[in-house]
Image (cartoon, rainbow, N blue to C red):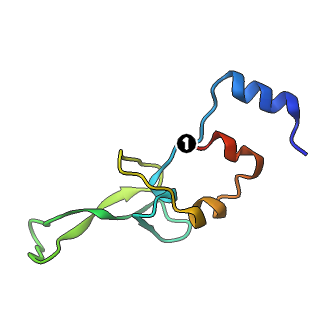
Amino acid sequence: MPDDNKFTKLRAIHYRIPPTCDTCIHGQLAAGSQWGTCALHRYLHAKHANPESGRGVSVRADGTCPNHQVDPAKLAAKGLGAHAEFFG
């Protein structure tokens, strides 16, 4: 059972767990890795260009962008429990 005083304090300080690449449907990160790629934001690599599709930009797990879309499975894997109210 969560401590009511703790959650009251977290609300009072406007505590938030930010949406990041590791909770986004576009983030392609191996489990436990801090680096991966984004499936949404692509670019043509100057040295190894694939003119048909490009490649996903490198992203950190703790990064974010305005196009973040929550992946429910990734969010559930974080095990936020009662702290889920602070996500977003």
Q: Quadrant of residue 29?
A: bottom left
> 35 above or below 8?
below
Count residues near mark 1 (Cα–Cα under 10 Å), then give few for <14, some for 14-19, many for 20+: few
Q: Residue at x 22, y 70 (%)?
A: 55
Residue farthest along the right direction in this orientation: 1
| 44 sits to left or right of 82 | left
User: Does 30 sit above or below residue 35?
Assistant: below
Please say if 52 is above or below 28: below
**15, 29: nearer the viewer:** 15
Residue at horizontal 12 percent and vertical 78 percent from the top:
52
Indicate the position of residue 20 as horizontal and vertical percent values.
Answer: 47, 50
Q: Going by the image, does 42 lie left or right of 17?
A: left
Secondary element at tag 1: loop
Q: Nearer the viewer, residue 61 or 72?
A: 72
* Residue at the spot 65% in from the left edge and 39% down from the top edge: 86
Question: Which of the 4 image quadrants contains residue 49?
Answer: bottom left
Instruction: Give residue 9's position: percent from left, percent from top.
Output: 76, 25
Query: What residue do we see at 30% from left, 63% from top?
Result: 40
In-image side of 72 versus 83 (left or right): left
Q: Quadrant of the C terminus?
A: top right
Image coordinates for residue 50, horizontal then vertical, percent = 12, 77
Q: Position of residue 10 (x, y in %)?
A: 72, 29
Mark 1 sits on what residue? 88
Residue type marked 1 = Gly
Asked where in the image residue 41 lies, by quadrant, the reply is bottom left
